[in-house]
Amino acid sequence: MKKSDLSVSNLTKNFNEALILSILFLEPKHGYQIALEIEEKSEGLFKFNHGTLYPILHKLEKEGLIKGDWEADSPKRKRKFYAITSIGKKHMKNQYREWENLTNHFFNIIGEVNK
Amino acid sequence: MNRFMPLLREINSRLALPQPLKSRVILEISGDIEDTFDYYINKGFTESDAEKKTLDKFSLSEESLAELINLHTSQYKSWLNNLSENTRAIWEKTLLSLVMMIVLVSFYTSINSAPFFQNTSYFTYPVLALFFITIGAGLIKFYQFYVVKKHETQKLRTGLNLVLYLTLVTFFTGVFGYFAEQYLSSGAGILSGEYFFLGLLTNAESLAQSVDWMIRSTSLMMTTLGVSLTTLLIWFFLTNKAGSIEEAEVSILLENH
């Protein structure tokens, strides 16, 4: 699936998607684990409310970038976990380069302050 | 009663999604709520602090809910869902059942005779074959819903749309057959344009052929409409049954949580 390049107008959306895909890059995780891990790894800087998380997870799933599956701990306790797909991995690698490019340009501009 | 039940109930009431999507989203959220709470307890928080932190995490804003709803609502699915849910009141169901019974009894009485099939179009047979396949697909779902009764919410509607698609294929096969009969008859000189009625009145052979064509076409269309209506009804009742099972499962989930 071809995704559009990073645009400044969609920065927050792309930022959240990149965080989620990066967390899922190594292993499948449950929704709550994704949110907590982002919070832990960013030392509390990126606080992910689940209200924001579910629409993004479901959107990424619809786009085929991640895949959701159910596991049952017991008949009454079912949990959904998400895994990144091969398309998602490819997309994330492209996104990484784009984020690098974007932040380089950003620091080029704001770096003037320190000169 | 679970401490997070009020929150789940609130999300359930605000989440305007068709089933089974609604159940799936609620199920996903409820699992994550429990795990988040356990996570905070394991981190050493007191129960009330863990509960407070979990509730903070799961406060779904109107904006997020709207985004979630928009993401999952396709017009086609809403239409299908509404089609079977529009008839809700008891008197509506009774009236619908009565009308259907009259139509079906008169239909099956007419076709249940040897002369009917001796004189019918050849296209009636594929229509009937499709009807029996559709009945088979419907019976599988019926068996799952009423006999096995071991429901998996995620797979509840799997195969239901097949009944609807087969009904449409059956119907259009019949319609195609009707026009094909007309085309074939025109080739045989029965329906040759401006002299059609004149031919009927003056030529005994043409009249006999025309009557034959009319009988074949009528029986084909009767069969097509009758079996399509039957399978459409089967789909309608199975869809309603799936809806009620899903509603019941959401209630059980909220009660148990």
Image (cartoon, helix red, strand yellow):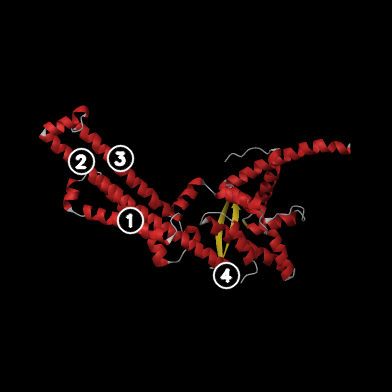
Q: Are marks 4 and 2 on the same chain?
A: yes
Q: Position of residue A15 (x, y in %)?
A: 70, 46
Q: Which residue is mark 4?
A: B256
Amino acid type at image mark 1: Met
Q: Most extreme residue toward the front, as rendered?
A: B91
Instruction: Kindly indicate whether the residue at mark 4 contacts the one at mark 1 (C-beta within 8 angstroms).
Output: no
| Most foreground residue, B102 or B140 | B102
Amino acid type at image mark 2: Met
Comparing marks 1 and 4, which lies closer to the viewer?
1
Instruction: Estimate how packed mark 1 is, as few (under 14), some (14 to 19) or many (20 or more) residues with alpha carbons within 10 Å.
Output: some
Q: Earlier in the sequence, mark 3 or mark 2?
A: 3
Q: Secondary structure at mark 4?
A: helix
Q: Specify the quadrant that holds the N terminus of chain B.
A: bottom right
Q: Most extreme residue toward the bottom, as rendered?
A: B1
Q: Position of residue B131 (x, y in %)?
A: 31, 52
Q: Position of residue B62 (x, y in %)?
A: 65, 52
| Cα–Cα span, label 1 and label 3 | 25 Å
Instruction: Kindly indicate whether the residue at mark 3 contacts the one at mark 1 (C-beta within 8 angstroms).
Output: no
Give the residue displayed 80% in from the left and 39% down from the top: A107
Amino acid type at image mark 3: Phe
Q: Which residue is mark 3?
A: B176
Q: Chain of mark 2?
A: B
Q: Which mark is residue B214?
A: 2
| Most foreground residue, B6 or A111 | B6
Q: Earlier in the sequence, mark 1 or mark 2?
A: 1
Comparing marks 4 and 2, which lies closer to the viewer?
2
Q: Are marks 3 and 2 on the same chain?
A: yes
Instruction: Estimate how packed mark 3 is, as few (under 14), some (14 to 19) or many (20 or more) residues with alpha carbons within 10 Å.
Output: few
